[in-house]
Image (tube, helix red, strand yellow):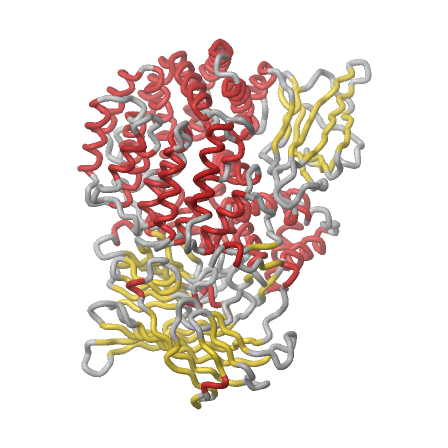
Amino acid sequence: MRADDTPLIRLEDYRPSDWLIDTVDLDINLHPQKTQVRALLGLRPNPAGRLGAPLILDGDELSLSGLRLDGLLIDESAYSATAQALTLHAPPQRRFTLTIDTQVDPSANTKLMGLYRSSRVYCTQCEADGFRRISYFLDRPDVMSIYSVRLEAAKLEAPVLLSNGNLVAAGEMAGGERHFAVWHDPHPKPAYLFALVGGALDHVRQDYVTADGRKVELAVHVEPGKAGRAGWAMDCLVRCMRWDERVFGRNYDLDVFNVVAVSDFNMGAMENKGLNIFNDKYVLADPQTATDGDYASIEAIIAHEYFHNWTGNRITCRDWFQLCLKEGLTVFRDQEFSADERSRPVKRIADVRTLRSTQFSEDAGPLAHPVRPRAYKEINNFYTPTVYEKGAEVIRMLKLLVGDDAFRAGMDLYFDRCDGTAATIEEFLACFAETSGKDLTQFARWYEQAGTPTIVASGRYDAAARTYTLDLAQTTAPTPGQPDKQPVVLPVALGLVGKAGDLPLVTGSAAYAGDGVIVLDQPSLSVAFSDVDEPPIPSLLRGFSAPARLELDLADADLLRLFSADSDSFNRWQALQSVASRALVSAGRSPGGHNALIATAGELAEALAGFLRVQAPADPAFAAQVLRLPVPADIAREIGRDVDPDAIHAAHRSLAAEIGLRLRPHLMELRERLGTSAAYRPDAASAGRRALRNEALGLIALADPEAGARLAEAQFAAADNLTDRLAALAAMTLVPGDAREALIARFAKTYAAEPLVLDKWLMAQALIAEAGTLDRVKGLMQHPAFSLGNPNRVRALIGGFAANLTQFNRPDGEGYAFVADMVVALDRTNPQVASRLLGSFKSWRMLEPARKALAEQKLAMVAQTPGLSRDVADIAERALA
């Protein structure tokens, strides 16, 4: 179907289903090519629906092989069946059962939606609309049913049979070659939360007792031989269950909780009720095959999927427009868990880096959309940073505005009031309005309005009156379909910093909410502070209290003073980022400004020298973040138009190299001090020391390539963990030559049997900012480690290249041509992976004219390709609109 032919689904057109399905009994006979599915549905008319409406069940590439109503065959004239729908023209206006037989081919399912096989393991992915690829169904989230599932398979092929809920029966079939398992989930759920797994799997198990006394059997299932790498995931699961009991009062509600890791998966993980299915990169970990970043990601994603049990499963979404209700809220919850488990300031900095690099760029381009979209053609294309990361920021602002106690009370009310239902954003916000007594009508605009607000701030000090007046204004640039913007509610956490630190905040302004927060809910306002005895430096958006850009014209000297004196760790980090960003933006716009970069490098190096000597050893994880410059993609977004990626890259390299050169003695001393002979541990403190040591290595390699190469080779040889080996490889990629190629080859040989590690090897090469990288990537596509059919491999190599600012944006357009060709090729087998790759073009309009024209040509080529999937056609259409 062409994009122009795809119907536009609008939030305003929502109406309840005409029919409800109270019970679903599935009997699934697993076979590699001919899986038989029998679905017995218990239906009834929906009192809120249309009386006498036909029953139209969704399908996707299905073939009907049997149909009965109340156990009796149906006359063929009473229904019509296609691959995409099953329609009963005049169904009974009462309760009845419908038995539907279908047959599916899991081995041929390259889309990895519905039922498919991954490394000989049967598994499912049903969100958002994959269940319709298994059986005809009312495949929408507001139809919630009680499921019973009988699975049958050959014992040798699939000795483990799992589904949602609790295991109620299991046994062998006559003859002993096949066996079965029956699972029952007592909690109603929509079809997108159905799951099954069948295969030969190893596992680790642990008993757990919830705060309310329920005994739960926890299990993490992995491919044979990999159980030794599942211990960290189990540890994370236990910790996040305890945290959810303590912080949100949520207890688990089944007798078992299963996690399964599979190697072929479109997403990171899926929260199916009681049976979470994960991309194996977010489960498997040991020091030799997982980095510190992997350990942290596993911790966060295990928590995220578990937290969905309440925010997503027990309470789901009325429709897919409410996706942020489960995803934004659950991202907020997993961020808070990780912050409590690790360093809260470091976690906040990392989350804001992600938000700015992914969501801010989405807001600035043709794919911008509100946290709750008003319309879509393909819902799979709205699993976006806006829905997830910006959605989490909206929850964070809500908590700041209503206060901790009212927020917890509002969450409790939401859980009590909406349990077992498919809810909306309005129902969610009503709970907090009730517990806080605040009118959240304007706050709800965050869900309706796209774009990143800009806060313009300035201040005036009156020495005679001892007052400081802060002027704030907000604007939001037009976005597709929303040319006119209204003011949003922006909580601006702030401090006034004097010579000795924070000054008291004394004001009678109605905009001041207390606790160091001004609420900017108008186009502009002024707040006067009294009893200010010295000219202060304003520290605004502390903790990044709102997802907004801040324009505040502070001199570099004032920013450097904030770095040394601000009590807010986030704004200390932000102060140095602002100094560096200002210089990089200037150099990116005017490539001849080398002298200004040198001056900025001197300022930054001077500030960092004392910091590294005195403070960095006490908090190395924070220090590692401080050493890291703003990424080139963020500089491109700040420039905003006529972007020259090569100029930005050159400026970035030049600034980093100059800082590294000036700090080299301090960096070498720091590496020596942070070195350890102790065995690897994944805890936050140990990871922080490695992070700082490896940031130092990268700066040294840029400042002195020969010295950096020697250090990298020595580190690779001595390392007892992947974190340090990969950091050595990354440093070597900055240094062209035979030594680099030798280390690349050595890495591949060392990890030849580890696909997840080779993904990192592929990506490290795809990110090399050199003219030969495109040819390197094309060559790596022929490497035995690469497969176009595996999403992880594609994301590592092709996605890595698309994230390479200079090589994707080559002046000759060959980078665009390569990625566009890969999108078209992937679309034939896996449209979801293809559409996400096409999202790499989201910032094409900000490029300088020559590159912009070349990128547009390749986007148009994709859009005009015959037979495009709905996923890819939708992205192409919106990108070109």
Residue 79 at x, y percent in the picture? 49, 82
Total label count? 0
> 763 or 147: nearer the eye?
763
- The image quadrant that residue 411 belongs to is bottom right
715 sits to left or right of 188: left
Q: Name the residue rendered at 71%, 51% in the picture.
A: 436
Residue 202 is left or right of residue 293, and the answer is left
Q: Quadrant of the C terminus?
A: top right
Q: Choose top left, top right, bottom left or bottom right for residue 424.
A: bottom right
Is residue 686 at least partly visible in the picture? Answer: yes
816 or 358: nearer the viewer: 816
In the image, residue 626 lies at what x, y percent?
A: 47, 25
Residue at screen point 28% across, 63% down:
107
**Residue 181 in view here:** no
Instruction: Please determine whether, in this image, residue 59 is positioned above or below residue 545.
Output: below
* Residue at point 39%, 50% (across, down): 833
Q: Is residue 538 left or right of residue 326?
A: right
Q: Please state the horizontal and vertical placement of residue 335, each as a whole percent of the image.
A: 50, 44
- Residue located at (65% from left, 24% from top): 552
